[in-house]
Image (spheres, rainbow, N blue to C red):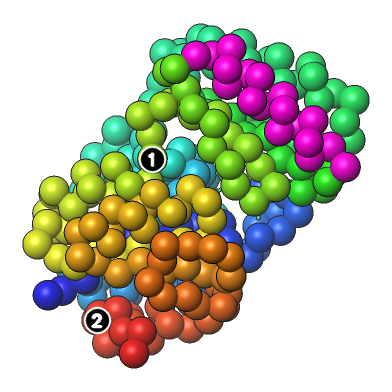
Amino acid sequence: MPDALFLDFDGTLVEIVGRPDAVAVDPSLPGILTRLRERLGGALALVSGRPVATLDGFLDPFSGDAAGLHGVEHRIGGHFFPCDPQAHPALRRGVDRLRDAVAGWPGVLVEDKGCSVALHWRLAPGHAAEAHRLMQELAGDLGGSYRLQGGKAVAEILPAFAGKGPIIERFMQEPPYRGRRPVFIGDDLTDENGFAVVNHLGGLSVRIGGGESIAAVHLPDPTSLRAALARWAELGRVDLG
Ligand SMILES: O=P(O)(O)OC[C@H]1O[C@H](O[C@H]2O[C@H](CO)[C@@H](O)[C@H](O)[C@H]2O)[C@H](O)[C@@H](O)[C@@H]1O
């Protein structure tokens, strides 16, 4: 059965760095993704917590199918299904509240993604507990339409329906993904939900780096994944043997 490949971005295709805007993309990566996508008959999608537009900016000139904000928005076959921040007035007020609350916490970063918001403390580990508590409070105040998502030195608030598993399932119902074996590669807590779905569908889950995971296979780091992707672009299939 041919493969359908789903790839996380931060910590998977690129190394984790101090700030969200400081990511360095290996110059070979856009070309590798373009070739691999062609060899997979188009069945390659990014599945990330980032907005789709941010992924496009980092990976230019590569641009293909993608799910952004953990599946809140997605693009498939050139059709973009966006999220309108104006449909989330309570969240927008919450972003203002967050900015005010962390104004005196140097190194704590608010990443406003329109329909979701992330609070980062990688550069300010001493504020981790209070930053996490702040996000828990805000998520509680926003009620059941939103949920809290943990990650690497980050907590995010996003619409409750969103998750990497559901959006992978959605892609798998559409051509060119339908009828293929889903392979999902990720590195973080939010990716476990995607691993559960591909495991259930009889696919392959691959975790980058260590840590407890339900993934079937582990690769050590983004460098080793990029080397594997280049090889798969020649082979035209995923090969972890
Ligand atoms: O689903 P992903 O593509 O893995 O995105 C998850 C979040 O990644 C980003 O934050 C993480 O990477 C940053 C840059 O290396 C790092 O500074 C931060 O500590 C990490 O948590 C991104 O900023 C978030 O928006 C994504 O949701």
Position above or below: 204 against 143:
below
Q: Which residue is mark 1?
A: 163
Which segment did they paint magenta?
126-143
Quarter occupied by the N terminus: bottom left
Location of residue 212 in the rendering, given as x and y in whole percent from the top left corner: 54, 63
Residue farthest along the bottom direction in this orientation? 241
Dot 2 falls on a residue whose secondary structure is: loop
Location of residue 27 in the rendering, given as x and y in whole percent from the top left corner: 56, 72
Dot 1 falls on a residue whose secondary structure is: loop
Residue shown at 47%/67% (left/top)? Answer: 207
User: Is 151 left, or right, of 182 in this rendering?
Assistant: right
Residue shown at 51%/44% (left/top)? Answer: 50
Position above or below: 45 against 109:
below
Kind of residue sitting beneath label 1: Gly
Q: Which residue is mark 2?
A: 236
User: Along the line of sight, which residue is nearer the eye, 102 or 206?
Assistant: 206
